[in-house]
Amino acid sequence: MNALSRPLIDASPALLAEGYAWLPDRMRRHPDRVLRTRLLGRPTLAVRGPEAVRFFYDERNVRRAGAMPEPVLGTLFGHGPVHTLDGEAHRARKEFFLPLLRPDLIAGLVEHVTRAWDEEVPAWTACERVVLFDAVGPVLTRGVCAWAGIPPDRADARSTARDLVALVDGFATLGPRHWRARRARGRLEDRLARLVEDVRSGRAAAPEGSVLDRLARHRDADGSLLDAGTAAVELLNVVRPTAAVGWFAVFTAHALHRWPEHRDRLRAGDTAYTAAFVHEVRRFYPFAPFLGGRAARDLSWRGERIPAGGMVLLDVYGQNHDEELWGDPYAFRPQRFLDRPVERDELIPQGGGDPRTGHRCPGEGLTIGLLEALAVRLARLEYTVPEQDLGIPLGRVPTRPRSGFVMTGVRTPAHAPAVVG
């Protein structure tokens, strides 16, 4: 009998209870960094390490189609997105996303978001207290909607930001956060599907070359235009990751508070150090606990077997805290990214593999560019951090400081920061 076909206790309840700690805690007991378990009734193999990343992203081994649970599709990704496609269908749809890797598009998004930040921050000085997690959402939303070509009347920053944050906040729970995310997705998809239809009919104009313009004209592998609903899903999958940068912006402020010795080099505009600091924030702080796919055939990895159709998990949080890769992984040390080049499949906060051909997020460069610019601005911003609960609960996915990071006495910097990234 296949080792992974033997009855095992389903680990789903433990996963929901333990969050980020669930998989790394169990992987530590297995020196080969491979674990067999059962999730959602399916035999499951969990893997970790650069070789495992290449194994996981090889479509001959692991497929995404049918792998994502409906609760994740119904909140975070939507139904029918590029993340769930394989083979030629995936490659054709990915053609739409590949330009997001271009430096000029990254710089354009950074410019829009930092302009929104610089316009918003003066208003914070009049507030008795600012909760950064709540305040940064509208800033990011205004910037990304302007960059994507979504008209201002279609993107009221505060209501749209609340819905975008809800999408990210509710994907890994079955409670009230999940249902808020579903309702938010319905509102956003309806609004953006109408916008796509209006652009195609000529009732609305999209800036030439914008994400909205390109998506309205994109043709899939069969040569047909995307239906308006799927186009809305993919438009959200461009806009939503920028909303998720809000989590990392708060983690950046958290890191600057805990380790203020990094602030001076960021303030000085040291671009190499800023990049290293941002990589360390993305490595150190938790966001995605793992990624999942389905075994495309009967597989074996380091002596453990998984039948075709079984689940394969890539331990993202565990790999980003793997002592063999990072040494002292629970120390916050940006210098590690200056000491040596990091291989592509070592640091995987947004997945691994090649973003041009595989499932690695093509928006990773956008995330990095935004965080580099915002890290400099946060380092130069003057404020007080009052007594509050800055604990980051690992049982909550996605997690963040419980307080949302409260700032008082916000004062604008004496000199406007230069855009980094």
Image (cartoon, grey):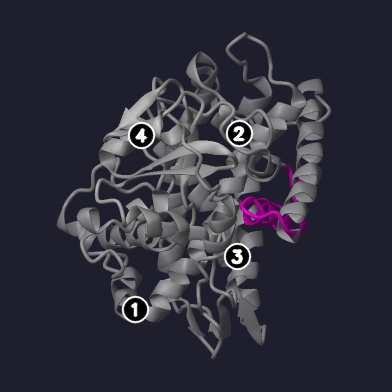
Distance, label 2 to label 3, CA atoms, is 22 Å
Q: Nearer the viewer, residue 398 or 282?
A: 398
Element type where label 1 sits in the image: loop
Q: Is residue 101 left or right of residue 54?
A: right
- Looking at marks 3 and 1 on the same chain, the residue that comes earlier in the sequence is marked by 3
For marks 2 and 1, give the CA distance.
38 Å
Find out whether the residues at labels 3 and 1 contact each other: C-beta distance under 8 Å. Answer: no
Residue type at mark 2: give it: Val
- Closer to the eye: label 1 or 4: 4
- In the depicted structure, whether residue 401 falls above or below residue 90: below
> Which mark is in front, 4 or 2?
4
Residue 318 lies, in percent from the top left, at 37, 54
Q: Position of residue 190 (x, y in %)?
A: 81, 38
Q: Main secondary structure of the magenta part?
A: helix
Determine whether the residue tagged by mark 2 lies in a helix, strand or loop: helix
Check disc 3 and give the amino acid type. Answer: Val
Q: Quadrant of the N terminus?
A: top left
Stretch in magenta: 151-175
Alpha carbons under labels 4 and 2: distance apart: 24 Å
- Whole-angstrom CA distance, mark 3 to mark 1, is 21 Å
Mark before the other along the chain sequence, 4 or 3: 3
Instruction: Name the residue that disc number 3 marks.
Output: 136
Confirm whether the magenta stretch covers residue 278. no
Crowd rating for badge 1 (residues with CA inside 10 Å; few <14, some 14–19, many 20+): few
Residue wearing tag 4? 353
Tell me the mark number nearer the camera, choosing from 2 and 1: 1
Residue that appears at 43% across and 35% down: 4
Q: Amino acid at mark 4?
A: Gly
